Amino acid sequence: MGRGLLPLTVLGLLFAPAIAVAAGDGEAGADKTRPRARELGLVIGVLTPGPLNAITDVTGVRVGHFTLQQGTRFNTGITAVLPHGGNLFHDKVPAAIVVGNGFGKLLGSTQVNELGELETPILLTGTLSVHKVADGLVTYMLSLPGMKEVRSINPVVGETNDGFLSDIRARPLGAAEVRRAIESAGDGPVAMGAVGAGTGTVCFDFKGGIGTASRRLDQDQGGWTVGVLVQTNFGGPLRISGLPPWIEDKPLGVYLEEQTRSLEESPNPDGSLMIVVATDAPLSHRNLRRLARRSLYGMARTGGYGSNGSGDYAIAFSTHEAWRIRRATDSPDKPRPVLDNAATSGLFLAAVEATEEAILDSLFAARTTEGFRGTVPALPVEKVLELAGSQTTLPTHP
């Protein structure tokens, strides 16, 4: 564990969302003028992030986006997470999927949990685009070298609903957009906010999107890395860890209620959250499932609680070389290293912290978006810093 950071008191800043949210398409990229929470001095948790503080800190993992933004009609897209740069069908990785609340359309989950392995990239998109995106993913996989005799593929496609900011019924995404998302995937910094599958999402009644973060354990804890990527589109009483709940006798929630737009009498926390967890630790399907479950605790730390209409899912996989499930004929049953149960606690904490920070960064990075049925404001970062008493100032750009 990283011992250089002191634990922060978890004090909440609370406010409730006003509308049922929606996730969407986009193709403009994250707003470079909006820094991440950590860059502004808001440190989440006690463990140390990886160099990029992103899921791509796990060696081999790649992320790509396709973003579609056309006027106010379309704010939607695709985000692709690749465990490695090879052919996943022939070089599978162990994986597990956990359901927090099952109001969603996560395609491919039953086979992943039955066999304990992942054989395609993970794609995230908008709700009504799931099946067209899955068809595009199958088309892409069948086009790869060495796939001529393949007659069964299990595409894994998750979603959140972007129908407030995008014309969700038009379903504008297909095979060409899938290919662009996958082929754009890289192992460097990850674009966040209103990009890819996060282009049309709404979170805590502010603009949500794609967020990512990572944690790296100390060598005495194994030196393993856990990286998380989220697609945020849910609600609840927002809590930003480390900030005082009261300043000048006015809760932050009251200020935000006054400054953004009127809340309805009954706040609507429905929406969805997709979480992708990657690690280089040698974990079996069983412990990957336990790791995925812990990521939902990170959601809870931000104020999400899995309401009736929220589709909340976590997908976890390991990139450890010895656990790559190759279709080799030589020694298919060779023993593999595996962490004992007692060695997983640090990984669990890493998943919680990385998920919490990834969710918050999806808010910090996203920009105000005008869409199909209205406009969703960005989180007022300047006011958050002001109420936090931070001396940090936002960068100015021409």
Image (cartoon, helix red, strand yellow):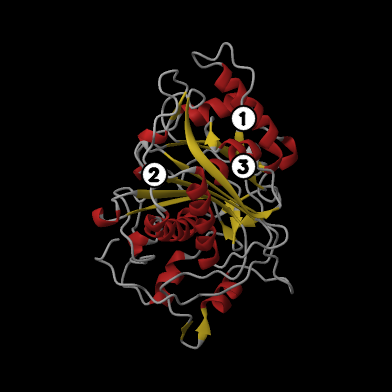
Residue at (69, 43) in percent of width and height? 105
Residue 342, position as x, y percentages in the image:
39, 58
Can residue 108 be seen here? yes
Label annotation for residue 338: 2
Residue at (46, 48) in percent of width and height? 192
The amino acid pointed to by label 3 is: Gly
Assess disc 1: are there few (<14), some (14-19) or many (≥20) residues with their C-alpha within 10 Å of its C-alpha: some
The image shows residue 194, relative to residue 218, as above or below, that is above
The amino acid pointed to by label 2 is: Val
Q: CB of mark 2 within 8 Å of CB of mark 3?
A: no
Label annotation for residue 42: none
Query: Which residue appears farthest toward the top when viewing the image?
Result: 148
The residue tagged 3 is 158
Helix, strand or loop status at disc 2: loop
Q: Earlier in the sequence, mark 2 or mark 3?
A: 3
The image shows residue 349, relative to residue 116, as above or below, that is below
The residue tagged 1 is 154
Residue 62, position as x, y percentages in the image:
42, 36
Disc 1 versus disc 2: nearer the observer: 2
